[in-house]
């Protein structure tokens, strides 16, 4: 059992370290690969669900349309055809939401201070930084996407390094 745990730590450590390094140094390509994998998964699951629903309809003698499965299939194909377009659109939506949430919080603090409640300037720091990050994401959607991929990449590098450390320390 101890040998299995050691080998598992070694394999996980090496694999996560390599994936993390790839994500850090090739973030845009890693992003596209992640979206393409998601597209393949949605396409396959959607196709299976469409076929299963049609077979079940035939067997049961009913005629229902598998709308959810078709939508999943179409989204999967669209992700496969233009992955970077969908990443950019998602980041744009996230940027708008970030900006709106931060502006809402700033307006709330201003209203509180106008109603007589003392709001220290420190309360404004996080919403202002969040608004700046939202605006940066809107102006440059790849910024947030690359940041997320690089952050996950560094996390995987640290995880892989700790697994390798576990392997070498358990080997004794």
Image (cartoon, rainbow, N blue to C red):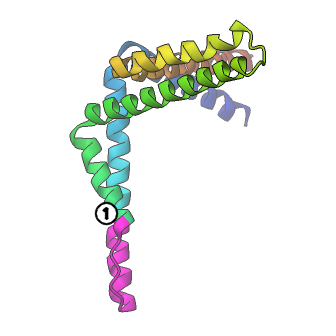
Of all residues, the one furthest to the bottom in this rendering is 61
Rendering coords of residue 28 (x, y %) = 33, 21
Asked whether residue 171 is in view, the answer is no
Report the span colored magenta: 47-67
Of all residues, the one furthest to the top in this rendering is 121
In the image, is residue 3 above or below residue 14? below
Quadrant that contains the C terminus: top right
- Secondary structure under tag 1 reads helix
Q: Is residue 152 left or right of residue 135?
A: right
User: Looking at the image, which residue is at 53% across and 15% down?
Assistant: 154
User: Looking at the image, which residue is at 73% across and 37% down?
Assistant: 1
- Answer with the quarter of the image where residue 6 lies: top right
Rendering coords of residue 84 (x, y %) = 27, 31
User: Looking at the image, which residue is at 67% across and 20% down?
Assistant: 109
Rendering coords of residue 157 (x, y %) = 54, 16
User: Looking at the image, which residue is at 39% across and 29% down?
Assistant: 91
Rendering coords of residue 89 (x, y %) = 33, 33
Task: Report the front residue among 145 and 42.
Answer: 145
In the image, is residue 78 above or below residue 86? below
Magenta residues, dominant SS class: helix
Q: Is residue 108 left or right of residue 152?
A: right
Q: Which residue is mark 1?
A: 70
């Amino acid at each position: 059992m101890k040998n299995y745990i050691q080998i598992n730590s070694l394999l996980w450590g090496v694999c996560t370290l390599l994936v993390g390094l790839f994500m850090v140094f090739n973030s845009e390509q890693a992003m596209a690969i992640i979206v393409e994998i998601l597209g393949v998964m949605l396409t396959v699951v959607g196709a299976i669900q469409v076929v299963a629903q049609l077979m079940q309809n035939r067997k049961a003698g009913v005629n229902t349309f598998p709308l959810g499965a078709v939508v999943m299939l179409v989204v999967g194909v669209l992700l496969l055809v233009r992955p970077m377009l969908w990443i950019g659109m998602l980041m744009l939506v996230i940027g708008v939401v970030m900006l709106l949430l931060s502006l809402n919080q700033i307006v709330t603090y201003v209203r509180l201070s106008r109603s007589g409640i003392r709001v220290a300037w420190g309360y404004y720091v996080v919403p202002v930084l969040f608004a700046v990050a939202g605006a940066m994401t809107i102006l440059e959607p790849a910024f947030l996407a690359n940041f997320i991929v690089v952050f996950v990449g560094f996390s995987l590098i640290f995880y892989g390094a700790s697994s390798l450390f576990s392997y070498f320390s358990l080997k004794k």
